[in-house]
């Protein structure tokens, strides 16, 4: 499960998305969502004995709004979200949002259960949080969070086996995943755009990538996000799989939240501060026993990311007073590629710009392919996604067809590699530095092709130095330098 923030569509993308909605074919995005999104409303969450009200999607789509959910005066934000997904444009529906959400749900093409909680009354009890699979925002409210059914089922089965119990009935035969969100997320404050948060969490319901927990478990405690178990979008976290999972969710979110995309890009462009937790666990501590695991491997050295940065002599930034005393601070573009890719915003910017220039459908198709590759397979999800996106750019040709040649015309297969170089601020000084972006697991042919054949072309076309600060237009300039002169039609 995870948390975040967020907003609406970039004007430059809106026209393409509306065109797609108008030409979607026999089954429109709105009709598809009616069949795949199952909304369950809970009016009094602390009463866990009640059954949720199942909303009638067909009736809502036709303009009929009846029942407790619609008569409540406390859940206007949740009501607006349901309308935007099920109603026609002009009658509360949002065609652009429907297009993006339908594209995400098609990754697994299974129903998604969405629990809607009226959390505006008394604080939710822990029993209510557990019963409704809600995430506490720290104030007893249901911060939006989601899970994938297959990975959750696998974990429950593993726990049952370790504890010599009967495994519960699997849910993934029916459901892609589940999301829980409360009205409070729509009531302002620091939560940001709830629509963007919804899209972010929806991606998590479709993501079956193996989290590699055996590498980040020490004495029954997970260190995916460090000692405190939480993460910030400007944090470098230990587990690169967690970075991938948050990064792809942010990337899709940025297609409906231009303001968030701009905020993240400005942070990179202005060389903002990156947070790194000082892991309380002494370096080199052994694995110990893990919860619901019969055995774990030697813990990853990335649990002690801060210690590695110290050893690499990366300049630390002092904050006085320090609002987060267990964290250290570094300038984002001071980090070498090996470390900068531990941040979800860097991953999100790379892939959201790919989607902006080559089309959201291509990116979502790559996620679908990647998901099948990563399910129950412990490997680098980031390297796999780059490989998938690059191969998609070959349009069916073998990789050997572009090796050893300086091909004329558009080279979309190189754009993911160029954007990876750009969003690591061209800090790779050697081919080994560059390959570290992908955990040293990207096929060597791709590394050789970009580094030996096109790296200098890209860096000359769009320099980053004391007199050339990053701008959004840089990504288009890189695309043009690689012969891709027009965005793909949506």
Image (cartoon, helix red, strand yellow):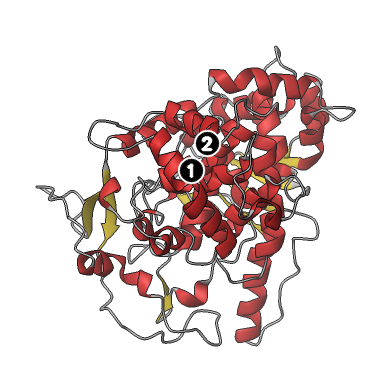
Left or right: residue 469 compared with residue 223:
left
Distance between mark 2 and mark 1 Cα atoms: 8 Å
What residue occupies the far left of the structure in this picture?
Answer: 320
User: Which is more N-terminal, label 1 or label 2?
Assistant: 2
* Above or below, 9 relative to 33: above
Left or right: residue 1 compared with residue 96:
left
At 50% across and 84% down in the image, what residue appears? 296
What residue is pinned by disc 1? 419
At 22% across and 60% down in the image, what residue appears? 326
Q: Are marks 2 and 1 in contact (CB under 8 Å)?
A: yes
What residue occupies the far front of the structure in this picture?
Answer: 405
Q: Nearer the viewer, residue 274 or 105?
A: 274
Q: Position of residue 403 (x, y in %)?
A: 63, 55
At 71% across and 77% down in the image, what residue appears? 167
Secondary structure beneath dot 1 equals helix
Evaluate whether residue 122 shows in this view: no
Q: Position of residue 59 (x, y in %)?
A: 81, 26
Q: Nearer the viewer, residue 105 or 66?
A: 105
Evaluate whether residue 422 shows in this view: yes
Q: Position of residue 69 (x, y in %)?
A: 66, 31
Q: Position of residue 363 (x, y in %)?
A: 64, 42
**Number of numbered discs present?**
2
Secondary structure beneath dot 2 equals helix
At 29% across and 47% down in the image, what residue appears? 332
For residue 208, the mark is none
**How many other residues sit within 10 Å of disc 1, few (<14), some (14-19) or many (≥20)?**
many
What residue is pinned by disc 2? 353
């Amino acid at each position: 499960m995870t948390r975040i923030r967020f907003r609406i569509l970039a004007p430059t993308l809106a026209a393409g998305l509306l065109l797609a909605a108008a030409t979607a074919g026999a089954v429109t995005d709105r009709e598809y969502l009616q069949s795949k999104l199952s909304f369950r409303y809970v009016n009094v969450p602390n009463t866990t004995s009640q059954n949720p009200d199942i909303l009638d999607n067909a009736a809502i789509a036709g303009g009929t709004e009846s029942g407790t959910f619609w008569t409540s005066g406390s859940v206007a934000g949740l009501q607006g979200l349901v309308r935007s997904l099920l109603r026609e444009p002009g009658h509360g529906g949002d065609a652009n949002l429907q297009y993006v959400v339908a594209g995400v749900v098609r990754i697994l093409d299974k129903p998604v259960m969405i629990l809607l909680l009226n959390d505006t009354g008394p604080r939710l009890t822990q029993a209510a949080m557990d019963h409704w699979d809600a995430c506490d925002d720290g104030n007893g409210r249901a911060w939006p969070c989601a899970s994938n059914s297959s990975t959750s089922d696998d974990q429950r089965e593993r726990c049952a086996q370790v504890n010599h119990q009967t495994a519960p009935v699997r849910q993934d035969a029916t459901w892609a995943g589940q999301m829980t969100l409360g009205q409070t997320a729509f009531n302002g404050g620091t939560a940001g755009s709830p629509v963007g948060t919804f899209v972010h969490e929806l991606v998590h319901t479709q993501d079956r990538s193996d989290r590699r927990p055996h590498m980040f478990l020490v004495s029954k405690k997970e260190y995916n996000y460090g000692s405190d178990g939480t993460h910030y979008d400007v944090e470098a976290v230990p587990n690169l799989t967690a970075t991938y999972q948050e990064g792809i969710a942010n990337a899709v979110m940025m297609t409906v939240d231009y303001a968030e995309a701009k905020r993240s890009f400005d942070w990179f462009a202005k060389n903002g501060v990156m947070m790194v937790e000082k892991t309380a666990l002494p370096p080199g501590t052994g694995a110990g026993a893990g919860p619901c695991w019969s055995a774990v491997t030697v813990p990853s050295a990335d649990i002690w990311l801060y210690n590695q940065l110290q050893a690499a002599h990366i300049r630390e930034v002092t904050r006085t007073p320090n609002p987060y005393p267990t964290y250290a601070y570094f300038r984002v573009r001071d980090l070498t590629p090996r470390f900068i890719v531990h941040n979800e915003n860097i991953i999100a910017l790379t892939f959201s710009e790919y989607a902006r220039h080559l089309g959201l459908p291509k990116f979502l198709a790559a996620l679908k392919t990647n998901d099948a590759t990563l399910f129950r397979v412990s490997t680098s999800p980031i390297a796999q996604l780059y490989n998938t996106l690059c191969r998609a750019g070959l349009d069916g040709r073998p990789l050997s067809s572009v090796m050893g040649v300086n091909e004329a015309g558009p080279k979309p297969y190189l754009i993911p590699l160029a954007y990876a170089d750009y969003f690591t601020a061209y800090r790779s000084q050697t081919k080994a530095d560059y390959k570290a972006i992908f955990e040293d697991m990207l096929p060597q042919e791709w590394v050789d092709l970009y580094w030996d054949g096109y790296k200098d072309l890209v860096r000359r076309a769009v320099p980053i130095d004391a007199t050339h600060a990053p701008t959004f237009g840089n990504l288009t300039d890189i695309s043009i330098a690689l012969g891709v002169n027009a965005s793909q039609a949506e």
